Image: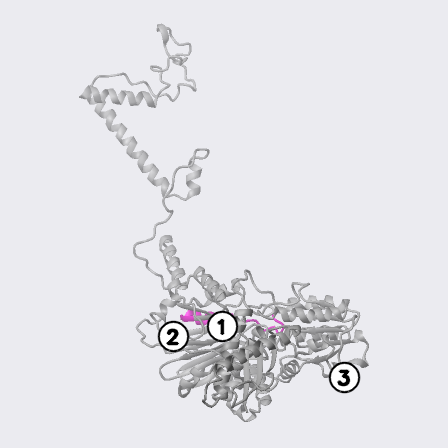
Amino acid sequence: MQASALKKVILMEEKKNPGTPDNNPGNKNSNEGGEKPKNEGANTGSNRNRRPRRPRSNNAQGAEKRQQGEQQRESSAQRQRSGDSNRPRSSQRGGRRGGKRGGSREPHYKTPANVQRSSDGVYTDINQAIAANKEVQQERLNTAAKIDTNNKARIRFTPLGGLGEIGGNIAVLETEKSAIIIDVGMSFPDEEMHGVDILVPDFSYLHTIKNKIAGIVITHGHEDHIGAVPYLFKELKFPIYGTPLPLGMIKNKFEEHGLKNDLKYFRFIEKRKPIKIGDFEVEWIHMTHSIIDSSSLAIRTPAGIIIHTGDFKIDHTPVDDYPADLQRIAQYGEEGVLCLLSDSTNSHKGGVTPSEKTVGPTFDRLFSAAKGRVIMSTFSSNVHRVYQAIQHGIKYNRKVAVIGRSMERNLETARQLGYIDIPEDIFIDAHEVARYSDDEVLIVTTGSQGEPMSALYRMATNEHRHIRIKPSDTVVISAKAIPGNEASISRVMNHLMRAGATVAYQDFSEIHVSGHAAQEEQKLILRLTQPKFFLPVHGEYNHIAKHAKTAVSCGVDERNILLMSDGDQVELTTKYLKKVKTIKTGKTYIDNQANAEIQNDIILDRQKLATEGIVMIVAQIDQQKHQLVGHPRVSSFGLVPDKDDKKFAKEIEAIIETYMAHHKESTAELEPKIIEDDIRAAVRKHILRKMKRYPLIVPTFYVV
């Protein structure tokens, strides 16, 4: 056994020292054949430090010592490797430069089991400092942990408009005892809503909770947020809270609708100052958008803080030099936000939305190149866009004619309130335009969405009282089509181009910039607020679904996000977010020319007339003979061509004669109403079988 152990030790020694004289016969210093080396006994560099060769021995004790020495060397190597693993990476590389990289290494520093946070933020132990900073990062990214989950309060949020559509924004935030309305906006009709100018929300739910509504909260002055306020006040009246410009615009509407006595409900607020409204404490926070004096809302509710962005974008260089109050939003985020409601309109757009100021250089190029009149059309509420156009008009020595009632009113309101500063003497009336040379005139007007009754449309079709389009005119449409209005804009552009005008619409990317946040701006708000729950608002379903994905990428738990539709009532507590019921919603159709509501059945009849046509039948029936008196009068519209009118009338007459033949033997007195219903059914069946149409049929029968 001892001999076997000794043999293993010898083999190991031979492997470690392959160049020793015993196992390297080619070594020049070996003593081959008993011949004496030439340099024997000399102190040369080759053998100066060479350890004397230990003679072989069969002594077991010597073998045990060698074995112990080998074990000690292995132990020392292990300690060396362990020490290297705890050194910085640069130290490890320095000790074995040129060698191959090893496998995976352990972390440089190990997190202590118990982190001792320093009161002054200074540490002598680097591991404690690393652990403390890691905790700080986790706390910073989880401000929702500050929310008191023992709070049992519940609040409900109900959008009555603005979801599943663009525009018509209105929502209700309520507790058991109190409620506030956030915005009361209108929307635009589609092409099938014949004779309808605007749509306003159905206020039925507000009637059911009217006794606990404490007020209306307005975020900004766009039509899709304030346009329906006068129609609500004709049914229900509550205090209206908002900043000066939005309420100033609502004041103009009230005067138009004969509601001057209701101006007493206005409550003008100061930004950054929380206002108590029912069970809620509401603070208006300055936000940038495509209209002056826009705001986000910080609403302190019994359950926690809710941030409502309103419509927004993050413009760091706005025209009025008042950027978004991100500091205030961050303060609320640090406190702990229960829920964020955020604008989703541009959620598919990557990057950031350009500043409103980027439109200025485009205006400069267009104005400098124009040889005749410049006609600029945009949204009437986009005061900063109008202001920039007027500034460039002044730069190129042009007088300014503002045409369009809503634009005149909004611009004058902004001037009176001091939001913009424009000299009075540069303005002229529409009838004065002809007194000036074409290159001295700028016309700012409405109609950027191709509305048939707008000033621009009437100019393009030669229906305007004072202005007609000339071939030397440059028309700038500084707006983007609202979904559904593309065809209307195309029509007005066709009219303008037929008149010979130069039209700038989408020729320049900076001719219009959006007022809504793109993805990076949405992410910024999400990161500043770090909400526990998230409700994307303002947009169609695909917009809010995309916004929800952006929120997940910013750390919001997917289970804490709910995608809503109009009428979905959501209950919110510190522990959960869930839909509890559906509220009745809808739209009311408004004819602006008559300033009156259009009933739903009228719209349906108009749609049927437009798609299916109409048939009118007038006939006389002899009471005694039960037969037609003369020929019936048949008129149709939108069903058969004029050349086939007589043929179609004969077909209808045959149907009536067949019907009367079946009743000829009857002695009962003829009832016109019964005859009309029966003839209507028979004619409908005939037209469906022959033409596959469902026209509106109006029979009128007289019994004589």
The image shows residue 664, relative to residue 294, as above or below, that is: below
Considering only order in the chain, which callout, 1 or 3, is on the residue closer to the N terminus?
A: 1
Residue 420: quarter of image: bottom right
Amino acid tagged 3: His
For label 2, the residue is 304
For label 3, the residue is 431
- For the residue labelled by badge 2, is the local secondary structure a helix, a strand or a loop? loop
Magenta residue span: 318-339
Amino acid tagged 2: Gly
- For the residue labelled by badge 3, is the local secondary structure a helix, a strand or a loop? helix
Q: Which tag is nearer the camera, tag 3 or tag 1?
A: 3
Instruction: Give coordinates of residue 118: x percent, y percent.
Output: 36, 61
For label 1, the residue is 309
Residue 509 visible in the snapshot: yes
The image shows residue 627, relative to residue 191, as above or below, that is: below
State the quadrant of the N terminus: top left
